[in-house]
């Protein structure tokens, strides 16, 4: 499902216009980003938990040449499914 499909789904389910649904979806996405930056974790109880995880710099290899490459430190996001999501999929 793409972002456009999600916006269309929200519009159909809520009766909002597509413009309002688009703003709502964008607001949720920005809220998750803001929560991860501020607290490092966002929990949507029963659905999922987003967590920001710091990854240290490390040495890797270029698979084509075999030359060593430094992979810089970064922040990765992990997503853990909640019970309602797991139950819905199984």
Image (cartoon, rainbow, N blue to C red):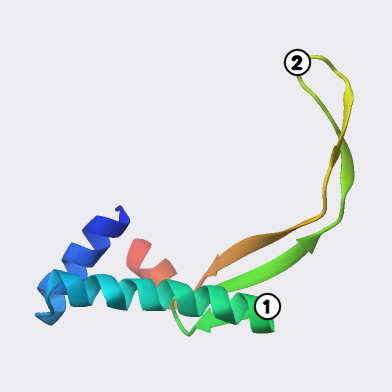
Camera-nearest residue between 68 and 44: 68
Q: Earlier in the sequence, mark 2 or mark 1?
A: 1
Relative height, residue 56 to residue 28 (above, below): above
Q: Position of residue 42 (x, y in %)?
A: 57, 80
Query: How many dots with numbers?
Result: 2
Say which residue appears at 36% left-offset and 62% top-offset: 89
Crowding at mark 2 (Cα within 10 Å: few <14, some 14-19, many 20+): few
Q: Which residue lies at the image location 43% right of the left edge and 72% below the top edge?
A: 29
Q: Whole-Å distance between the Cαs marked 2 and 1?
A: 36 Å
Q: Quadrant of residue 52?
A: bottom right
Residue lying at the far top in this picture: please name it.
65
Numbered disc 2: secondary structure: loop
Q: Which residue is mark 2?
A: 64
Picture residue at 14% right of the left edge, 76% below the top: 13
Pointer 1 residue: 40
What numbered label is drawn on residue 31?
A: none
Q: Quadrant of residue 76?
A: bottom right
Between 30 and 58, the residue placed more toward the observer is: 30
Tell me: 10 left or right of 41: left
Where is residue 41 shown, x and y percent of the image? 63, 79
Quadrant in which the C terminus appears? bottom left
Q: Nearer the viewer, residue 89 or 43?
A: 43
Q: Which residue sits at x=22%, y=74%?
A: 21
User: Where, by quadrant of the figure, is residue 39 drawn?
Assistant: bottom right
Residue 86: x and y in percent read 43, 67
Is 12 situated left or right of 39 in this image? left
Circle 1 — which element? loop
Q: Position of residue 71 (x, y in %)?
A: 82, 42
């Amino acid at each position: 499902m793409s972002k456009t499909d999600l916006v269309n789904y929200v519009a159909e389910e809520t009766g909002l216009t597509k413009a309002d649904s688009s703003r709502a979806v964008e607001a949720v996405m920005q809220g998750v980003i803001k929560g991860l930056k501020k607290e490092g974790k966002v929990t949507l109880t029963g659905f999922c938990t987003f967590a920001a995880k710091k990854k240290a710099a490390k040495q890797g290899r270029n698979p084509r040449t075999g030359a060593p490459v430094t992979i810089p430190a970064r922040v990765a996001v992990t997503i853990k499914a909640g019970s309602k999501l797991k139950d819905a999929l199984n």
